[in-house]
Image (spheres, helix red, strand yellow):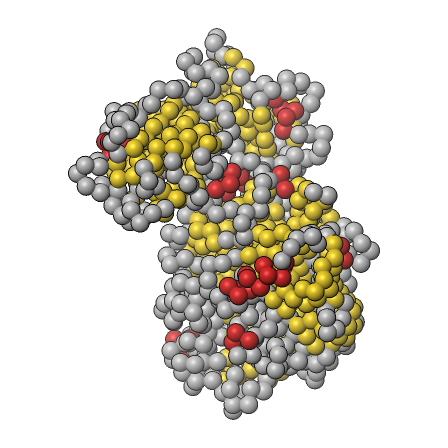
Amino acid sequence: MGAAALLAGTVLALQPATAAHAADTLISQGRTVTASSQENGGTPAAYAVDGDTGTRWSSAASDQQWLQVDLGSQATISKVVLNWETAYGKAYQIQTSNDGTTWTTVYSTTTSTGGNETLNVSGSGRYVRMNGITRATGYGYSLWEFQVFGSFDATNPGGSCGTANAAQGRPATASSQENAGTPASSAVDGDTGTRWSSAASDPQWLQVDLGATQQICQVVLNWETAYGKAYQIQTSDNGTTWTTVYSTTTSTGGNETLNVSGSGRYVRMNGTARATGYGYSLWEFQVHTGSSTTGGTTTGGTTGGSTGGTTGPIQGGGDLGPNVIVFDPSTPNIQAKLDQVFQQQESAQFGDGRYAFLFKPGTYSNLNAQIGFYTSIAGLGLSPDATQINGDVTVDAGWFNGNATQNFWRSAENFAVKPVSGSDRWAVAQAAPFRRMHVEGDLNLAPNGYGWASGGYIADSKIDGTVGNYSQQQWYTRDSSIGGFSNGVWNQVFSGVQGAPAQSFPNPPYTTLGTTPVSREKPFLYLDGSDYKVFVPAKRTNASGVDWASGTPAGTSIPLSQFYVVKAGATAATINAALAQGLNLLFTPGVYHVDQTINITRPDTVVLGLGLATVVPDNGVTAIKVADVDGVKLAGLLLDAGTVNSPTLLQVGPDGASADHSADPTSVQDVFVRVGGARAGSVTTGMVINSNNTLIDHTWIWRADHGTGVGWNTNPSDYGLLVHGNDVLATGLFVEHFKKYDVEWSGERGRTIFFQNEIAYDAPNQAAVQNGSTLGYAAYKVDDSVNTHEAWGVGSYCNFTADPTIRMDHGFEVPDKPNVKLHDALVVSLGGMGQYNHVVNSTGSATSGTSTVPSNVVSYP
């Protein structure tokens, strides 16, 4: 939650006071406490509630940090005492919550002077937190003690759940009823021989008015045969705004007793998917009140920790869900499972299937893992050589008649492969990373028959033999080791690659940098014994070769218990609650619709997706926002625009972000943006980078030119990538088909190593792309205010299928300044479908004819 949103909270008490209430009781000492971060192992959150003024909690040295205590049940809060160490909060809030998700501000200041502050407040809740907004020093926030005073409800002091049915006889309403004999009131009449049943359609709901706001600790559903397979239990204070306290997509009906934690006057069952062809039918809908201390356990259902309900503190860890398929060398029928998923995914370009194959360390023989759409294959060792596949990992293009230009959205990572024939085939297009791999032989990047191909990306990999480029139009390889490289077509780029061909653009079209200025490899899941952990590799500067050459790479391991494992049914509210508790996120393979922005505010948060996990924003929200903090790692996600226009799908840093993150930059790796194709999506700008020093390492930002919901005004999006931050580095930048600038860069000292672009195919005429007096919007625009910028190996192609007479003045538009430099730039007209007049500004010859020959500029200026 951002500071602006928090400041909008109601301030119930504004001035600290020194007088204590006579009835105040300390109720926080020794309770469960969590924090957004801790400075080190000697300053944990628990030290702020241990009653010892010689121990303390301290946070990381950045703003927007919090400390939160769980009182165990709802309490009336009368006083909070903060005993600050020298590093105190100048601006902070005291907030309360019933569920750990929705917060009410009961005290706020922007002028604290630290020391010992006694704050008389008025509020209630199970959770109380200090929400820091601005530090007073260059250190973090540090508290010797965080004390909460108040009292528990005398009728429910221990958090027990009442046995009386608070819903019985209360007013009940429903979205529909099957007939006059099955009204809503029959579900709350205490008679198990009468029932409510809905119309036979989704969605449907039943709600009861308890008459006043109460703590909800248990809901009992007594289903008739027609039950809800997927539903939510929700609470509300006003009957309009609802909070989900339980959610499932796998109910089996019968009698379900759900222990929950929440509050509200209204409680409802919100059905989203029926289990039968009939409606939803309940003999009884019971609600029990009090204060649950069960931590969200359930009988006959699934907790929010697994499916997305907000049942108090979110638990980290757990299983990886049904779409993560884990093998060990003794697993039977591995090939059959690989083939089954491939048959489903081979041509499912815009389907909802998402899968990850994970291989435990060991040796596997006689396998051919064919990898289709939205499928990832990875080893679970700490180094690639821990997992050995004697066989093949194959991407080919038989499904598309030998044309590999649409082999998108798949990946291979972190294992060694010894191909049967001596050569492995990885014939991919965009958004198909090949990371942290060891190929004990050759690697062929072309489809069988050497048809068209439009990739691609390799990083942190060792190929013992030769990489056969063959028909690949362009390719980028970073921080790797190769035995050789066969040929080039238009734009083959290398940085930090041992064994790369020498610089020779444009003949052959090799752009070669000896090192990569700054890089940090993508986080990955691995097994430490029987425990899952996520390894976060360390940042490297001027790197060359793989980061695992000596065995164990540099970096840190994070146990899975520190991740909220996002699975089917998860809601944005639960995801944000997990983040607010200090958890990282591991998205399991699936498609996740979010009705609110996922807000990442804690430094060094890791958000990792498996199996091309996909986030779809509903109602025009931004899918993900990252605060202007150090070291956030975003990796392995597809952000897919919803049907209501969003301002952007990913925003790194707020407008005006200015902090220096050079020591610990945020990274965006294998995070892909899609507008259209699966639906008529709409977004103003695909991705916005405001934070300084951000690393963009392999992205494909794509406004769809084929699929469902495609057309000039059907899947509109003006800009692909806007970079406002300074010192941003992009390695492996693929951006295509936006209506205005595909990339616009206004930050200083930006750098791009490899850029691939196609101008929007579907521009209806010249007027539609006219940019003032300039013909067309450049693919890559550096703003006139920029003084320093540099890019290597950049290409733009046009293919105006709606009007082949359209002309572009240039593919690249940059200010004429000595420190703004482009190296190895090209433009190509694909078959004469439109033309470029120049390459950069007014430099470079025009394209012409139908021969698809690039026009090149080796150095600009």
x, y percent for residue 477: 69, 68
Q: State the quadrant of the C terminus.
A: bottom right
Determine the residue positioned at 49% across, 31% down. Answer: 297
Residue lying furthest left? 180
Determine the residue positioned at 48% across, 80% down. Answer: 799
Q: Using the image, determine if residue 178 lies above or below residue 547.
A: above
Please name whichever residue, 151 or 466, is drawn nearer the observer in this view of the structure.
466
Please name whichever residue, 519 or 460, is drawn nearer the observer in this view of the structure.
460
Residue lying furthest front? 332
Number of residue marks: 0
Q: In which quadrant of the rendered view does residue 856 lie?
A: bottom right
x, y percent for residue 303: 48, 36
Determine the residue positioned at 67% across, 45% down. Answer: 533
Q: Left of 466 or right of it: where is 196?
A: left
Q: Left of 153 or right of it: where is 148?
A: right
Q: Left of 386 or right of it: where is 63?
A: left
Determine the residue positioned at 43% across, 69% down. Answer: 707
Please name whichever residue, 512 or 191, is drawn nearer the observer in this view of the structure.
191
